[in-house]
Amino acid sequence: MPPPDEGSPASLHSPNLRGSSGILLLALNSHKSLFRFLETTPIAWTGQKFFYQSNHLRIWYTNNFLIFITTTTLPSLYFLILPILSTLGNLPFKNFVVFVGILLCGIFNVWVNIAQILYGKEFVLVLNKIEDINETLLNQYPNCLQNKNTFNLDVLFKLFNNAYLKYVINCPVGCILYNLDPVYFLLKEVSDQNFVDVRLIIALRYSFMVIVSAESCRLFPLIFLLFLSGMRLSGTFQESVTLCLMGIGLVLSMLFNFAVVKGLGRIPLHLYWYIVSGTGMILAVIHILMLYTYRISDFSADLLSTWAVWSARLDGSYLKRRYYRKKVRAMGVVEIAAGVGENRFYVLKRSTGVKYFAIIVTYTINLLLGVPPELLDDLR
């Protein structure tokens, strides 16, 4: 199979997207048809395959610049600076929450764009080449790979479509219908002061929440895979990055679990909703990352066994076959480890996920018992 030209789709193992996720895919397709001008991104997940195109990059740059200015920069300046000027230095808590949320969305979009520009085309071509290699190996050595679980993206995309996608579509829509989103309270104040039309308020809330959520859904699998491959290619930095990520996950899980337990009745409902949802999302991301650490090792072991069979069946002299057998034996299984620099503290295995979640529960209980209730009552 020749590499795809620019503008052609690159095939991938098509995950099973039937069942309950069909409604969500229909919603994303409706979003895609309504906002077709956003679909000039160089590389994105379309629901069945990754797609790369280099045409109309100037339009893509312009769209991203306008989206970044209208949905991130201007609202951030308005919600942050105007309350400070109007209240003589006092920043309302809800304004700060929305400002942080908008800022995070802007940072996410910027890094997505950078990743697509630097790595998009090569990433799609490599994926297509891996598909071609797998088909060739299956045709030449069917007995070798017949009973092995080859590496694919089914687990990732099934979990993504059935968990993450449901949240980011249903939660914003529910917030808009029941007026529970933080954007509603801020825009309500703006409309009361400036007589902004109600339809314009709904449009702004939709642009802030649903569009950002839908675009994040399309780009999340790509960014996740870019992150995995980039972390592996980082060489000596891989152990340090893994250790930092595990530390960040531990701290975030502990704090969000604490906020869920102690925040009920103390935090407003429209903010408490996001804390509960964030807790579930953090645990889901940790589960996915832990899952693929040992799946990478399994895939590496399968490749080594396949190459061992291939080296034994090479046509040629005995010395050539012996040389390749020794080369294969000298290769080690790819492992994801945590540490500092090249010093490994531990290798992530199947049992690491259970131990990690047990540590999260232990630290959460210690935090719940260590913070006095009087300190939390002062936050009301």
Image (spheres, grey):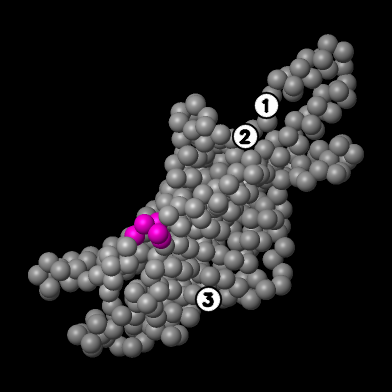
Q: Residues within 10 Å of mark 3 (few under 14, many from 20)?
A: few
* Residue 96: mark in rendering: none
For the residue marked with disc 2, what is the amino acid? Answer: Glu
For the residue marked with disc 1, what is the amino acid? Answer: Gly
Residue 77 sits in quarter: bottom left
In the rendered image, which residue does mark 1 sit on? 332
Q: Position of residue 324 (x, y in %)?
A: 77, 19
Rounded to the nearest angstrom, the CA distance separating label 1 from label 3 is 45 Å
The local secondary structure at tag 3 comes to helix
Residue at 44 percent across and 45 percent down: it is 247
Q: Position of residue 59 (x, y in %)?
A: 43, 59
For the residue marked with disc 3, what is the amino acid? Answer: Asn
The local secondary structure at tag 1 comes to loop
Q: Residues within 10 Å of mark 2 (few under 14, many from 20)?
A: some
Tell me if 105 is positioned left or right of 148 in this view: left
Tell me if 157 is positioned left or right of 205 in this view: right
Q: From what the image shows, is residue 338 above or below residue 21?
A: above
Tell me if 17 is positioned left or right of 218 in this view: right
Quadrant (top left/top right/bottom left/bottom right) for the N terminus: top right
Residue at 86 percent across and 43 percent down: it is 146
Marks 2 and 1: in contact by CB < 8 Å? yes
Q: Magenta region: which residues?
A: 367-371
Quadrant (top left/top right/bottom left/bottom right) for the C terminus: bottom left
Prevailing secondary structure of the magenta residues: helix
The local secondary structure at tag 2 comes to loop
Q: Nearer the viewer, residue 110 or 53?
A: 110
Q: Residues within 10 Å of mark 1 (few under 14, many from 20)?
A: few
Q: From what the image shows, is residue 332 above or below residue 320?
A: below
Outermost right residue: 143
In the rendered image, which residue does mark 3 sit on? 170
In the rendered image, which residue does mark 2 sit on? 335
